[in-house]
Amino acid sequence: MTQEWILVLGAGSDMARAAARRFARAGYNIQQASRNTEELDIEARHLQLKYGVQTQTLPFDALEFDSHAAFYAELEPKPIGILLAFGALGEQARDQKDVSWIRKIIDTNYTGAASILEVIAADFERRKRGFIVGTSSVAGDRGRQSNYIYGSAKAGLSTYLAGLRHRLHGSGVNVLTVKPGFVATKMTTGLDLPDKLTAGPQEAGERIYRAVQKEKHLVYIRPIWRWIMLIIIHMPEFIFKRTKL
Ligand SMILES: NC(=O)c1ccc[n+]([C@@H]2O[C@H](COP(=O)([O-])OP(=O)(O)OC[C@H]3O[C@@H](n4cnc5c(N)ncnc54)[C@H](OP(=O)(O)O)[C@@H]3O)[C@@H](O)[C@H]2O)c1
């Protein structure tokens, strides 16, 4: 049993919860941070009883950028690893007509992540240890009419994580980018997702845990997504623009 702590940002996420449970099963203590702390308290009791680990529940809003430095400064003990899971899918048809939604989607998925990760990265760089997991999306790999506002924010996040990985490599800190593909969570409720391409949250939690242990740089929850995206990325524009993706 380790005495190390993992900080989960956006801990109410179904995928994050499953990943946190997997880390707790391996003996890590869990700091859960999100907007809905009541929900997190229930999960905290589950983690304590089932896995015998310690937990902390902390209020955190990705959009309150000015609070991020103090949030991390007050965090005690400092974690060995970060799971950043918060995100907002939005609704393309609504968002493209309203700049306040465009800002919200970009700020939740990109600016909020960069804001808190810069604070954490500086600490990990100083301590010369730790790992950072950022949840991006295949939606960021090529802009599509059905979700390009969300996709462009995730493209920014993927590039941000790649740059952070490059910067922290010499400090012994690994940065893992997760591109889930489809996962059945609150976010995808009501979407008609093909079974073969859709993972459950528990499967996602296990993949993320293993990818951290192996110090991977990039993981897709279902490996087939690597090949799907290879095709989509390389499809010539004159064909791509005729598709309904
Ligand atoms: N599910 C998929 O198929 C899929 C595919 C590609 C990428 N992803 C990404 O994977 C990550 C996890 O998503 P999920 O599928 O597990 O969805 P989820 O269950 O809906 O979780 C998303 C979480 O983000 C949190 N959040 C949103 N805005 C926030 C803010 N301003 N501050 C703090 N937390 C905030 C939500 O908190 P509340 O509970 O307070 O609303 C929610 O717990 C997301 O980044 C998502 O974009 C998911």
Image (cartoon, rainbow, N blue to C red):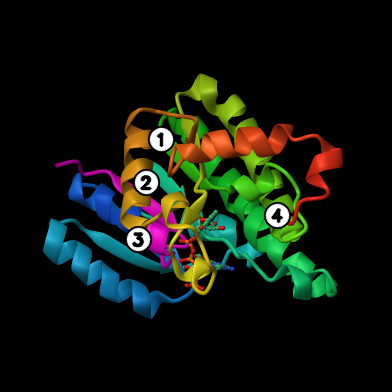
Residue 26 shows up from this direction: yes
Foreground residue, 142 or 178? 142
- Give the residue type at disc 2: Pro
Label 3 SS: helix
Q: Residue at x 52, y 74 (%)?
A: 190
Rendered location of residue 109, percent (x, y) = 64, 57
Separation of marks 3 and 1 at Cα, in angstroms: 20 Å
Closer to us: mark 1 or mark 4?
4
> Dot 1: few (<14), some (14–19), or many (≥20) neighbours within 10 Å?
many
The residue beneath circle 4 is: 245
Counting residues from the N terminus, which is met first, the one under dot 1 or under dot 4?
A: 1
Q: Are the two marked residues, 3 and 2, in contact with CB atoms closer than 8 angstroms? A: no
Counting residues from the N terminus, which is met first, the one under dot 2 or under dot 4?
A: 2
Separation of marks 3 and 2 at Cα, in angstroms: 17 Å
Counting residues from the N terminus, which is met first, the one under dot 3 or under dot 4?
A: 3
Look at the numbered disc 1 and say if its residue's Cβ is closer than 8 Å to ligand 1: no
Q: Are the two marked residues, 1 and 2, in contact with CB atoms closer than 8 angstroms? A: yes
Instruction: Judge left or right: residue 141 versus residue 40.
Output: right
Counting residues from the N terminus, which is met first, the one under dot 1 or under dot 2?
A: 2
The residue beneath circle 1 is: 130
Label 1 SS: loop
- Give the residue type at disc 3: Arg
Looking at the image, residue 25 lies above or below residue 55:
above
Identify the image quadrant of residue 16: bottom left
Q: Which residues are magenta?
A: 1-16
Label 2 SS: loop
The residue beneath circle 2 is: 79
Which quadrant, please, contains the N terminus? top left
Which label sits on residue 17?
3
Instruction: Judge left or right: residue 28 versus residue 74.
Output: left
- Give the residue type at disc 4: Leu
